[in-house]
Image (cartoon, rainbow, N blue to C red):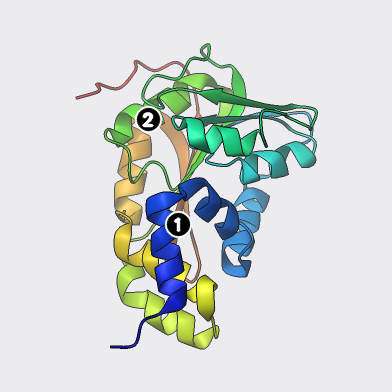
Amino acid sequence: MRLDPAGLSVTFLLMANRPALFERLHRLGWHSDMIEEWVRGLRLQPGQTILDVGCGPGMLTRRLAGMGMRATGFDQSGAMLRRAKRGGVVQQDGLAFVQGDAHSLPFEDGAYDHAIAASLVNVAANPLGVVGEMRRATAVGGTVSFLVPSAGMTAAVADYVARHRLHGFSAAALRAWASRAPKMTADEATFLLGQAGLGDITIRQLLEGMVVIATGTRVGRWPSPTLR
C-alpha cells in the first residue's frame, strides 16, 4: 500500500499541532479565495468592530484588522491564541485576542457591529447556543455570519480536486476537511439563524457548493435561545 506523504502530514498536524495546521490552511489558494469571497460579500467597512468567534491562530482576524476594522479574535484554545499573538505580542492596531467559551461570550450586549465564525458552528456542542451568543454580542442592524462545510461536500470533493488540479498538501487538506468535519445543509443553517432570532437571512454557497455561508441581521432584541 502506497502511503500519501501529504495526507500523513495533514493527519500529523491535526493530531499534534492544530494551530500550525490552521495557519497553513489560510495560505492555501482554495482556502484563501474562499475566505476572501466570504468577507467581500459581507460588505464590511473600515472602522467597524467585528468579532471573529473560533479565530484559531488569528489569520482571518489579522486580515480584518489589516482592512481597517477593529477586530477581536475569540477562541477557547490557549494554544491557538498563543499562535495568534505570535509569542504574546499583538503587532497591529485595532486587534485583540480573547480566550473563552463561545457558548458564553464575555462581551456586552450589542458590543460589535458584526460577528463571524468559520468552521465553528458545525463542531460546537450547542450550535444554537453559539449563534445566539453571537447575535447577542452584535448590535441591532449588524450581521452574524458563519461558514460551514455543506452536506454535499464529501461526495463532491474528489471531482473538485481533480478539476482544479489540486495536489500535495492542498489536496490532502481539502480531502481531510471533507471526510472529518460535521456538515450542515443550507436549510439547517437557515433554521439555526432563525431560531437564534436573526432576520433578513441569506445563504450563499462557495467552493462550488461545498461550503455554506449563512448570514442574518440582528433586527431587534430577542430572548436568548434555550441552551439545551
User: Is residue 213 among the parts visible in the rendering?
Assistant: yes
Residue at screen point 39% across, 75% down: 157
Q: Quadrant of the C terminus?
A: top left
| Nearer to the camera, 41 or 166 | 166
Gap in angstroms between the C-alphas marked 1 and 2? 26 Å
Q: Quadrant of the N terminus?
A: bottom left
- Residue 211 position, x and y percent, is 44, 60
- Residue 180 position, x and y percent, is 31, 60
SS at circle 1: helix
| Amino acid type indicated by mark 1 | Leu
Horizontal side of 9 relative to 189 (left or right) equals right
Horizontal side of 150 relative to 17 (left or right) equals left
Q: Which residue is mark 1?
A: 13
Residue at screen point 74% across, 33% down: 69
* Foreground: disc 1 or disc 2: 1
Q: Earlier in the sequence, mark 1 or mark 2?
A: 1
| Amino acid type indicated by mark 2 | Val
SS at circle 2: helix
Q: State the image quarter where residue 73 is shown.
A: top right
Residue at screen point 61% across, 40% down: 58
Q: Which residue is mark 2?
A: 130
Q: Which mark is residue 135?
A: none
- Residue 31 position, x and y percent, is 57, 62
Horizontal side of 81 relative to 62 (left or right) equals left
Residue at screen point 58% across, 58% down: 24
Q: Is residue 196 above or below residue 170?
A: above
